Amino acid sequence: MESAVVDMAAPPARGQQRQIAATRPMPNTATQTIVSGWGQLSARRIKYPGWHYQELFDLTIPSETVAARFRRLADQWTAETENMSSIDDMVLHPAYQEIIRMGPPVIPLLIDDIEQSQNYWFYALYSLSGGQNPVPAAHAGDVDKMTEAWIGWARANGYR
């Protein structure tokens, strides 16, 4: 996808959306959406006669930062699962699943949280790491050893 320099006099505020249009000759390319921890940029092109396209860029900046959203969801999950004894029920909780859907940008936040509070983020880390499990079978179930293993994994993989 070709890039274009678009001058935005005032970027959109958090929670707002701005549409930017630019016209220039270019080959046909696919619609693309880029999502990161700070926002989402969608680009689509409309073909006009000849080789002219209009590019429409939608930039959405979330109203919460990744860290604030994580903290809100983690606090909700902790409050609503503190009396649960089933790990399956805990990891299937909607707030826990939403944290997983936030993607790899939350890995450092999960590591910090298990180090400080030893909340059960091991399944989320397993999911977000692409199925990696640094915990040796002999340490399964030992929360302290599992925490140490994930902290070591985070250091080795650049999350610390």
Image (cartoon, rainbow, N blue to C red):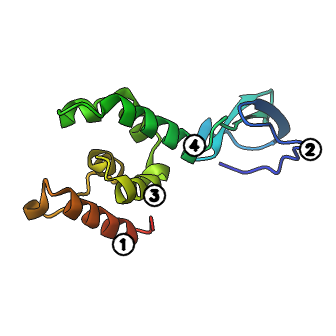
**Nearer the camera: disc 3 or disc 2:** 3
The reply, left or right, for residue 13 in relation to residue 87 is: right
Circles 3, 1 touching at the beta carbon (< 8 Å)? no
Circles 2, 4 touching at the beta carbon (< 8 Å)? no
Three-letter amino acid code at disc 1? Ala
SS state under label 1: helix
Q: Which circle's residue, 3 or 1, is located before the other in the chain?
A: 3
- Distance between the alpha carbons at the discs numbered 4 and 3: 13 Å
The reply, left or right, for residue 130 in relation to residue 4 is: left
Name the residue that disc number 3 marks.
108
Q: Is residue 134 visible?
A: no
The reply, left or right, for residue 27 in relation to residue 148 is: right
Name the residue that disc number 4 marks.
68
Across and down, in percent, residue 22 comes to: 84, 38
**Nearer the camera: disc 2 or disc 4:** 4
Name the residue that disc number 1 marks.
156
- Distance between the alpha carbons at the discs numbered 2 and 4: 27 Å
Q: Which circle's residue, 1 or 2, is located before the other in the chain?
A: 2
Three-letter amino acid code at disc 2? Ala
- Distance between the alpha carbons at the discs numbered 1 and 4: 26 Å
Q: Which circle's residue, 3 or 2, is located before the other in the chain?
A: 2
Across and down, in percent, residue 52 comes to: 81, 35
Q: Does 108 appear above or below 1?
A: below
- Distance between the alpha carbons at the discs numbered 3 and 1: 12 Å
**Nearer the camera: disc 1 or disc 4:** 4
Label disc, if present, on residue 9 of the rendered structure: 2
Q: Which circle's residue, 4 or 3, is located before the other in the chain?
A: 4
Q: Residue at x 82, y 51 (%)?
A: 5
